[in-house]
Amino acid sequence: MLGEGILKGLGETARNFVGSYVSAERLTTVQYPEERAPEIEATRDFPFLVYDGTDGEAGLRCVACQICEKECPPKCIYIVKSTDKKPDAFGKPQIYPTRFDIDISVCMSCQICVEVCPFEAIKMDTEFELSTTDRFGGLLYDRKELSKSNEYYHKIHPTEAAEVDARLAEEKVKADAKAKAAAAAAAAKAAAVPAQAPAHITPKPPVTAVEGDKQG
Amino acid sequence: MIEKADQIFVLLSHWLVSFLPSALQPAAAVLLSVVAIIVTFPALFAISVLLERKGLGRMQNRYGPNRVGPYGIFQPVADGVKALIKEDIVPFRADAVVHFLAPVFLVVVVFMGYAVLPMGRNMTLVNMDAGLLFFFAIGASTELSVFMAGWSSRNKYSLLGAMRAVAQMISYEVPLLMSSVAVVMITGSLSLGKIVDAQNQYTYGFPHWYVFTPWGFAGFVLFAIAATAETNRSPFDLPEGESELVAGYFTEYSGFKFALFFLGEYVGMMGISGLAATLFLGGWSAPFSWLGWVPSWFWFFAKVMLAMCIFIWVRGTLPRLRQDQLMNFAWKFVLPLTLLNLIVAGLWRFMGEGWLRWLVCSAILLLAYTLMGRGGMRGDHIGPRSYRYAE
Amino acid sequence: MSIVFYVIAGLSVAGALAAVLLKNTVHCALALTLAFAGLALLFLELDAQFAGFAQILVYIGAVAILVVFAILLTRGSETPQDTVLSRNPLVGLVTAAAIFAVLGWAVLHSSLSLPQESAKPQVTVMDIGNALMGRYVLPLEIVALLLTAALIGAVIVAMHEKEAAK
């Protein structure tokens, strides 16, 4: 019947009108900046550097391998390697970046730096309210501004951070086990060397050390 | 007391005018009423603009404007200030005189239409014998202003919009007049005051409004459709289609002239709602006889604002009609139904009181609507595609 | 002959003169609309309400729009002429003088036969309706027939054009 669709449409808009006062599903506006939309974990904006523990300089996971600098498509990362070694979060002396600059006006959030980093040192942040009045200097972030703690990483990407921590712990366990095995083998070798007969040149069987699974 | 509240504006005007010497009094009374109209209806325009923006927003699951003042009630003030301080650009090759005159002509003409509307008991500005004809004559002049606006801008989009607007307004002028001729036939007079008086009677508390009769209901619906098209209002707003023609015939207008066009459109809408209320909804008469203590002017303005709300509601619901669909609708559906409505109104008048005339009239109208509507539902026959190549 | 009459008459004559003397054709059409409005005001001044409003409704609301459409759909609005006065004004002057003489004779003879101050006839719309349906019903039906023929003719012409375009 002609006009039926019109009446149905009028009914639908009337439902919308009345419903917008009573139910939340009929009024979907989020009034920014007083209200914020709920945060989604998989957002990404610009990179930041993760540090373990509380010291921003000593706990930095980054060892300035410069892989992310080479892989970055718009070349927005600038790294200067250090010439000395400082102790990292586990006490081992490591190379660290003296300069680590990211120009976020150039960065295109492609996440390639995160994907290629072997040390889980650089991750994507979710902060978007970054406007500043300085077009050039204000958008060039240095190492201090980029370093954020692992607790912060857990806060913004909980599942991802938990995965990363689990992986790092597993690798540490494997690395410790390997170190122990190597130390035990070295000690056994040192103990076995004096008991050896004087040698004639026979090829020794190759030493089967566990080399294969260094990279986890 | 009730009488005083009902006639308060009339008494106020008499009292104010009594301060002047008696030679000037008639002119002063008219001038006072004119000033009252010019003050009231733009205020209602501001309210209805706000209502439209908030209402459309709520219908579209969003807030309307709510930053300027609590719940956005000062938004019209902000809009007015913006319109006043914007630079008034007149295109270089535009026809300056006609470009200037078009919005002025439109606003003058739509305000003149209010002279015959009875806004309350004894509250008509000019009590003319042929009042309805005056209103339609004035309404026909708005088309000329639309054309002037579109042509003087020397802009092909404006011209296209103006031509479409004029074609649409002419096509829907005929159903508009025809559906009100039925009312005139039954009342026996062209004077709007007499039409309201004829509807101001009650049986068992129910009013004798014409919308409660079969021919009156059909006439009201057809009048509403024609009125929506006359004022270039969605779903008939192709001439000012924002997504197709930039802004149609008022593309080249900025600042205050655009505000005048906007004002003219809304004031025209309220004028034609006032006419619809007068012709079909009983003008200033109350819906039930026991509500007669509420002042008559309250009912009139309530009906006008209700009509505005329905305009906004329809705008939020329906998509825009294409020009050829619009014209087809006017000439092939609305006009024949209005002519049939005239015949049915005549039948009603001459069949005498009783249930038979209700049955017969309703049956004829429903049958005609269904049969003609079937033609509209059929859809166009879309055959296989044919191509025409440039030779 | 009050001041109001002179003002309205001046307006009408000015509109009519502008309609023939202006260069831009659309301006001429708008000036013609002004002349129509002046005529309607004259009707209203004589208390002929129906005639006045019908004049506005039909002439300004329909005929003026028709004139404007005709100008736009043909090439009338593109280039204004160099001069609006024709090349041999003599023929035009003679024709205009002859028509003016006939009209002037008709007006002067008719107004001289009536007394100067006569009461205005009070004609209501109901009287017009009664006359149209009673005494003048045959001319009404013939005019209706004429209009129907014009409408059907327009539709046929348009249909032929559509078939020719196919």
Image (tube, coloured by chain):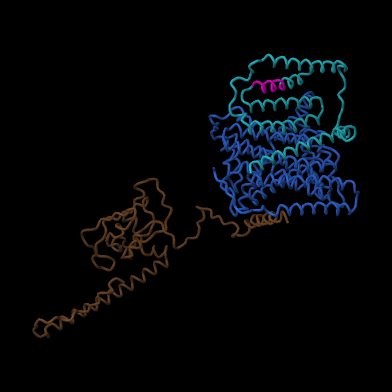
**Residue furthest front in the image:** B391
Question: As rendered, which of A86 and C17 lies closer to the eye?
Answer: C17
Please tell me which residue is depicted at 31% across the width and 65% down the height of the picture.
Answer: A119
Majority SS type along the magenta span: helix
Question: As rendered, which of B380 and C2 lies closer to the eye?
Answer: B380
Q: Position of residue C109 (x, y in %)?
A: 84, 16
Which image quadrant for residue B1?
top right
- Stretch in magenta: C11-21
Please tell me which residue is depicted at 21% across the width and 58% down the height of the picture.
Answer: A83
Classify residue A52 as left or right of residue B341.
left
Q: Colour of chain B?
A: blue
Which image quadrant for residue B167?
top right
Q: Position of residue B22 (x, y in %)?
A: 80, 24
Classify residue A170 as left or right of residue B98.
left
Q: Position of residue A180 (x, y in %)?
A: 24, 78
Chain colored brown = A
Question: As rendered, which of B69 and B91 lies closer to the eye?
Answer: B91
Q: Is residue C12 magenta?
A: yes
Q: Is residue A135 magenta?
A: no
Which image quadrant for residue B342?
top right
Chain colored cyan = C
Classify residue C93 as left or right of residue C83.
right
